């Protein structure tokens, strides 16, 4: 069995609780995974509530073949967790969440596609993708999310929620919170919030590089 320390388990639980504290999901509506090394992935147990997660609700699995090591059943969405982490060597954490404003916009008949109402969206998240509704837990959602996340750090799933990736827990939580802030602004402005222009985004990028 790969070396998974108590420190790894506590870090995973702490991150899950932080996600709940920020109200990025409710009850069992989301799931989380973390690549702790090239061979091993931790995934939240199917049906577990991240805000109240315990260490015995963490699935330990082989990164290469998905074999579960500790007899804890992984999230029903584990297909895209494995897929994204295998496809994206630059990220180690995958979070599926359902924040209020973001999921509301994802349920509209004509959801917005431009979320650049604050600098933090293009600067810290980048382009945001959107997929039509796909049944949770299906092979199709595993394939579609994996393919889409190859070139995006955040994906909106229509009538479902969001998927976000990052190098660590802090980056994932930051991206999720900035996205939810942007969605709140769009909702509260009745989608009339002014979007940043490409020139403004480029100008900001130049200053951020200095």
Image (cartoon, rainbow, N blue to C red):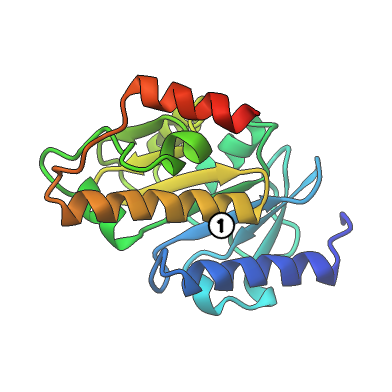
Residue 96 makes an appearance in the image = yes
Q: Residue at x 26, y 34 (%)?
A: 195
Res 191 quadrant in image:
top left
Q: Is residue 159 left or right of residue 123?
A: left
Local SS, label 1: strand
Quadrant including the N terminus: bottom right
Q: Nearer the viewer, residue 10 or 134?
A: 10
Could you say which quadrant of the image residue 131 lies in? Answer: top left
* Residue that carries the numbered disc 1 in the rendered image: 32
- Pointer 1 local density, CA inside 10 Å: few below 14, some 14–19, many at least 20: many
Q: Residue at x 72, y 67 (%)?
A: 11
Image coordinates for residue 66, horizontal then vertical, percent? 67, 45
Q: Position of residue 13 (x, y in %)?
A: 65, 71
Looking at the image, residue 23 lies above or below residue 153: below
Mark yes or no: residue 159 visible.
no
Q: Quadrant of the C terminus?
A: top right
Where residue 7 appears, as percent x and y from the top left, is 82, 69
Left or right: residue 195 compared with residue 49: left
Vertical position of residue 88 compared to residue 31: above or below: above
Residue 59, given in percent of the width and then of the height, sits at: 66, 62
């Amino acid at each position: 069995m790969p070396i998974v320390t108590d420190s790894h388990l506590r870090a995973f639980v702490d991150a899950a609780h932080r996600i709940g504290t920020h109200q990025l999901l409710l009850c069992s509506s989301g799931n989380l995974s973390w690549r702790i090394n090239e061979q091993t992935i931790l995934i939240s147990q199917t049906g577990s509530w991240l805000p109240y997660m315990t260490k015995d609700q963490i699935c330990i699995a082989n990164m290469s073949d998905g074999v579960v090591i500790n007899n804890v059943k992984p999230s029903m969405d584990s297909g895209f967790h494995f897929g994204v982490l295998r496809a994206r060597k630059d990220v180690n954490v995958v979070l599926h969440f359902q924040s209020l404003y973001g999921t509301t916009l994802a349920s509209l008949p004509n959801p917005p596609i431009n979320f650049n109402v604050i600098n933090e969206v293009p600067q810290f998240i980048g382009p945001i993708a959107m997929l039509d509704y796909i049944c949770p837990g299906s092979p199709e959602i595993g394939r579609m999310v994996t393919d889409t996340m190859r070139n995006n750090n955040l994906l909106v799933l229509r009538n479902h929620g969001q998927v976000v990736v990052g190098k660590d827990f802090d980056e994932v939580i930051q991206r999720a919170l900035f996205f939810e802030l942007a969605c709140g602004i769009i909702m509260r402005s009745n989608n009339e919030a002014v979007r940043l222009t490409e020139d403004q985004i480029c100008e900001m990028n130049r200053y951020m590089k200095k």
